[in-house]
Image (tube, grey):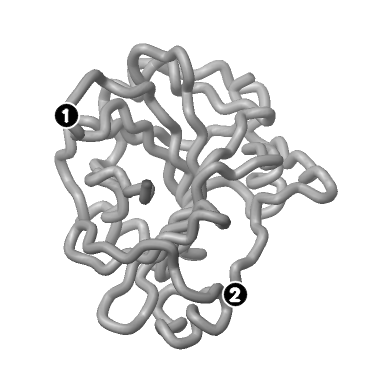
């Protein structure tokens, strides 16, 4: 079955300038200036050869072949490639963004060691779908690079239990999109009750 994007996701973040609740819960910072070395051979940034905003449908077909499924999701045409666990979303004829699920052999330490500190961090506490609440997840954004990396918080019951940043946090999903700015992200999805914005202050554990 085709994997779909959480409805609130990519447009992208419910940004409010640093919530008071975050400021009231300072983290144990042990590494504001810590720059871990990425592990050799990690799979955090394996390229697909697709550039959102530039790669068209014909180029995708030449690179990846025909998709396993085609559907309309959130107003955009979606192509699903099961062998890559990847969804491509189109705006007209161009790729708008790419979601890669089930990423393995990638940690937050690898990401920060390669790209530097994230520009924005958010915690998602619910995905707006019917049914029981899902576990929170941490999303690390690099809008100027057009990248987002997700780390699940299995077992956490609310956002505060998901607010520590460890070098060993596993990354299980990544999104590539047309580069933008923090300000544009803030305007994109204000006031979402399921989003908590956190300031990156280094690794806390």
Q: Which mark is residue 13?
A: none
Whether residue 184 is visible, yes or no, is: yes
Task: Compare residues 31 and 9 and report the one nearer the observer.
Answer: 9
- Are the residues flagged by discs 1 and 2 in contact, CB closer than 8 Å? no
Task: Compare residues 78 and 112 and report the one nearer the observer.
Answer: 78
Q: Position of residue 170 (x, y in %)?
A: 61, 32
Q: Image point 42% across, 30% down: which residue?
A: 137
Q: Image point 19% across, 34% down: which residue?
A: 128
Q: Image point 23% across, 58% down: which residue?
A: 73
Answer left or right for 89 relative to 201: left
Whether residue 143 is visible, yes or no, is: no
In the displayed image of the protein, which residue is found farthest to the bottom? 58
Q: Which residue is mark 2?
A: 49
Q: Which residue is mark 1?
A: 130
- Dot 1 falls on a residue whose secondary structure is loop
Up the image or down, 151 lies above or below 102; here it is above
> In which image quadrant can residue 182 be found?
bottom left
Q: Earlier in the sequence, mark 1 or mark 2?
A: 2
Q: Image point 44% across, 68% down: which residue?
A: 67
Density class for disc 2 (Cα within 10 Å; few <14, some 14-19, many ≥20) is few
């Amino acid at each position: 079955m085709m994997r779909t994007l959480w409805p609130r996701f990519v447009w992208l973040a419910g940004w409010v300038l640093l919530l008071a609740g975050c400021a009231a819960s300072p983290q144990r910072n042990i590494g504001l200036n810590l720059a871990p070395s990425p592990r050799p051979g990690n799979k955090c940034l394996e390229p697909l050869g697709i550039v959102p905003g530039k790669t068209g449908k014909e180029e995708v077909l030449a690179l990846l072949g025909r998709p396993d499924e085609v559907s309309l999701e959130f107003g955009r045409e979606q192509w699903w490639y099961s062998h890559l666990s990847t969804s491509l979303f189109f705006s007209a004829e161009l790729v708008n963004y790419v979601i890669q699920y089930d990423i393995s052999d990638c940690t937050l330490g690898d990401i920060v060691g390669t790209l530097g500190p994230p520009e924005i961090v958010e915690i998602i506490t619910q995905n707006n779908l019917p049914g029981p609440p899902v576990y929170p997840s941490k999303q690390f954004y690099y809008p100027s690079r057009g990248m987002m990396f997700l780390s699940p918080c299995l077992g956490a019951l609310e956002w505060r239990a998901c607010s520590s940043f460890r070098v060993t946090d596993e990354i299980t999903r990544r999104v590539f999109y047309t580069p933008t700015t923090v300000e544009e992200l803030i305007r994109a999805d204000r006031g979402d009750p399921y989003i908590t914005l956190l300031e990156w202050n280094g690794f806390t554990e």
